[in-house]
Amino acid sequence: MELPFNVANHLDKTLRAAASTLGLAERGFEPEIRVADPANGDFQANGALAFAKREKQNPRALGQQIVDQLGSLKAGFDITLAGPGFINFRIKPEALLTWLEVYDSEEHLQTGASSARAGQTWVVDYSSPNTAKQMHVGHLRSAVIGEAICRLLAFSGAKVIRDNHIGDWGTQFGKLIWAYKRHLDQAALGREPLVEFERLYKLGNQAAESDPAVLAEAQQELVRLQGGDADNLAIWKRINDVSLAAFQEIYDQFGIRFDYTLGESFYNDKVGRVYRELTDCGLAQESQGALVVFHPEHPRFKSQPFIIRKRDGAANYASSDLATILYRVEHFQVDGAAYVIDFRQSDHMDQLFLTAGKWFERTGRKLPQLEHVDFGTVLGEDNKPLKTRSGENIRLKDLLDEARERAYQLVSAKSPEFPEAERRAIAAVVGVASVQYADLSQNRSSDYVFSWDKMISLEGNTAAYLLYAVARIRSIFRRAGLDAAVPPVVGATAPATPQEIALARKLAKFPDAVQLATNTLRPHFLGLYLYELAGDYSTFYAADKVIVDDPAVRARRLLLCHRTLIILETGLHLLGLRTLERM
Ligand code: ARG
């Protein structure tokens, strides 16, 4: 009995075939395969009830008809019919064994993976901060969620293009360049350039506010920059280069490498075409000197237009985002684009997608799938957006420094015997992973409360708990003098004790968890699965001694340990976390 990689998909296919034999498929029968309550089975098919109701049939009898067609599944599953036609499938231990034997590495786990977007090309637009400023806690979620989504999509067979759509072109550069030319502190620039740029911007802004002559000068600087003045372009380029280098220091900690950094300035020479096309196809119109798009069918956007060119003739966020869609289609031939952006930009995204949809339709182009992967706010313990005590934004750099420091306390309390340097190295992984995982373990659409004590803890659904589970399995191999890369699992028999069986059943549900997280672009589904898996492993480990004399029992328990190890590691890597050998 060979169990396919994704059991749920296999059941879905088999039930569809059965339904088609019975002539039900044509009438719209859907299997509705779900993960079952473990007491009932591994998966259940719920489709008979709704179908029978619609067709005025007896659901139980219909369920039985379908079960009668499922002979090919009987070798691998115990199949039972429950209540009004629910079909329960419990994987047999022998079938679990074959599954565990085949999927023995991260690589082999990937070969089986698939998703609704397999084979497609997706741009993931994430992080995307504005330059000349430091990244702060408001920039955390897009980076962390975006990277997890990239990895999930790539794992499941999509071609992923990581694009950092930085805000590197805006009116702020007029004031900034004005101040740069007059007040630059070279020493400060050498020490912490982004701090210096922030100081300069504030200075320029204040000066412009209190003195109209300065404001006019700053506007002149902006005009010169936009007109291609060599000096101003050089300053602007320097500011952006320095900003990106500073961003990369943060990205390195999160394991992020962008394929492209095509920010707003890149689309500068591409917005003219957008104005022309949108005007020619009758979508855009002049309104009070600006170029705008109304959506008459929309309750709000019929009167609140999408401004695509400002009154002063300058491009804006909307024009560059429209040009970006066209570029991604023409240059990368994308099937889809995922925008990992704060929910507060929902109006912008809705207007962008609506506008692009009509634009593409009127010009006979195929619109790629456009997804706003939105997320909520990081809150402090007072339930307000997280800030420092004095009310300022918390710098991401400081946040990660503190995470490492706090993780160091945790690691030192747990393993005081490890050398200092090793404890520091472990803490660097645990600290950053804790911050990432606190974010990823929540449904991204909700706000979440940032709590150091909860996130840097060995208890609960935390990174430290999961990383420790990984390290603990590695130590079993180490202590037994075995290489975890080539575990001696030959001759393993099928899982037999209740704890072995429960663990094996959980392991075989990994593909389903990954697929769910990938299809919904919600990494927390995978996080929850890993947390539950670690729990099942603990229960198994507490009940069943691994290194026993009986070679068959020992081999099958080592097999369970090893497969738990690779699935935990694969899952954590998919979320963007690094894992540890010991902790
Ligand atoms: N730079 C923008 C901001 O800081 C985010 C850009 C997101 N990406 C996009 N294509 N609009 O709010």
Image (spheres, rainbow, N blue to C red):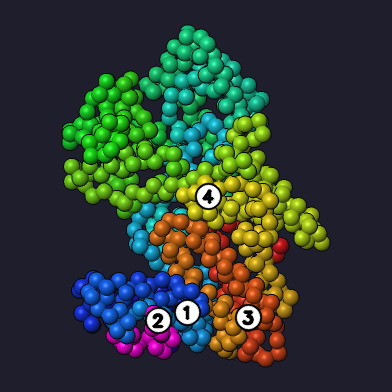
**First-in-chain label (4 vs 1):** 1
Q: Is mark 1 on a helix, strand or loop?
A: loop
Measure the C-alpha gap from mark 2 to mark 4: 42 Å
Kindly identify which numbered label has been placed on residue 558. Answer: 3
Rendering coords of residue 350 (x, y %): 33, 41
Task: Please tell me in which quadrant of the rendered image residue 184 appears.
Answer: top right
**First-in-chain label (3 vs 2):** 2
Q: Name the residue under label 2.
A: 82
Q: Which amino acid does label 4 sit on?
A: Val
Disc 3 CB within 8 Å of nearest ligand 1 atom: no
At horizontal 61% and vertical 32% (from top left) the residue drawn is 392
**First-in-chain label (2 vs 1):** 1
The range drawn in magenta is 65-83
Measure the C-alpha gap from mark 3 to mark 4: 34 Å
Q: Mark 1 points at which residue?
A: 40
Q: Is mark 4 on a helix, strand or loop?
A: helix
Q: Nearer the viewer, residue 357 or 531?
A: 531
